């Protein structure tokens, strides 16, 4: 079952989320918060699989709160303002629910979350990636991946034996299939295995003879990963 929290400064909105979670067998809503400070304390202390987060909380931007979290918890944004939808997907939100939220739409978001979180758990418990390419299901050992390159709607998986597998999948989707403890996105076009990184100089990663640029959007997460 997915352990979730909800953050919203509107009591009625929290009541709706609580009611919907109680009706859904996949979700255990363990805590609700009306302010970001209390939510932050809880997130730092307890394991959470998912959060429902309102984008505007007491004139504070929930999007900025999420971007600054040290723990990157999967999020479903909730808001009364449709213009924030694109921002939500730009930070890899699982979904975006527009208030007033209908239960059917809520259930659709939860089903999506279940699929993604189950895939991630399976990935963390295994030592290989399965992906469809060239009309077959490929089983690729994590240790064999040198880096992954994004090409519009495709990715090219570069392997240590100089082989390459090209699959029709987005960078966001393949990143969700990979275990966070083993891989990191360092550029809009590159994902690399942490253990293959030999050195970092300026804004470049070195993987043996391969140089991978570090994008401005990802430089902080790369720095945090390699702090002493």
Image (cartoon, helix red, strand yellow):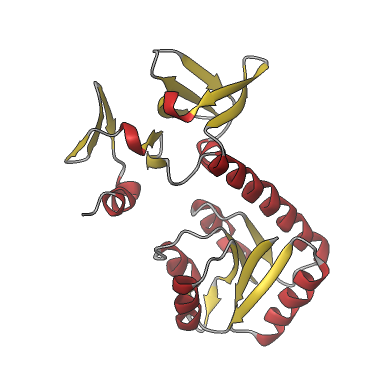
| x, y percent for residue 166 | 53, 20
Quarter that holds the N terminus? bottom right
Residue at the (71%, 57%) spot, across then down: 109
Residue at the (23%, 33%) spot, across then down: 198
Residue at the (74%, 72%) spot, across then down: 100
| x, y percent for residue 37 | 45, 82
Left or right? Give the position of 107 relative to 40.
Answer: right
Is residue 196 placed above or below 176 in the rendered structure?
Answer: above
Q: Is residue 81 visible?
A: no
Quarter that holds the C terminus? bottom left
Q: Quadrant of residue 204?
A: top left
Q: Quadrant of residue 95?
A: bottom right
| x, y percent for residue 85 | 59, 58
Left or right? Give the position of 63 relative to 34.
Answer: left
Q: Nearer the viewer, residue 153 or 207?
A: 207
User: Total label count?
Assistant: 0
């Amino acid at each position: 079952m997915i352990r979730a929290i909800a953050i919203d400064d509107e009591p009625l909105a929290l009541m709706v989320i609580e009611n919907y979670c109680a009706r859904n067998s996949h979700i255990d809503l363990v805590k609700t918060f009306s302010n970001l400070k209390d939510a932050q304390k809880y997130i730092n202390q307890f394991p959470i699989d998912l959060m429902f987060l309102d984008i505007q909380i007491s004139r504070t931007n929930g999007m900025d709160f999420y971007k600054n979290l040290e723990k990157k918890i999967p999020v479903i944004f909730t808001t009364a303002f449709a213009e924030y939808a694109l921002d939500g997907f730009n930070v890899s939100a699982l979904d975006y629910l527009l208030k007033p939220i209908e239960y059917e739409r809520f259930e659709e978001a939860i089903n999506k979350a279940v699929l993604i979180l189950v895939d991630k758990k399976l990935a963390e418990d295994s030592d290989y990636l399965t992906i469809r390419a060239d009309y077959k299901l490929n089983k690729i050992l994590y240790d064999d991946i040198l880096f992954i390159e994004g090409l519009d709607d495709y990715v090219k998986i570069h392997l240590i034996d100089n082989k390459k597998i090209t699959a029709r999948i987005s960078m966001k989707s393949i990143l969700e299939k990979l275990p966070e403890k083993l891989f990191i996105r360092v550029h809009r076009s590159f994902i690399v295995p942490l253990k293959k990184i030999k050195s970092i100089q300026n804004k470049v990663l070195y993987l043996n003879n391969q140089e991978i640029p570090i994008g401005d959007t990802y430089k902080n997460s790369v720095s945090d990963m390699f702090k002493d």
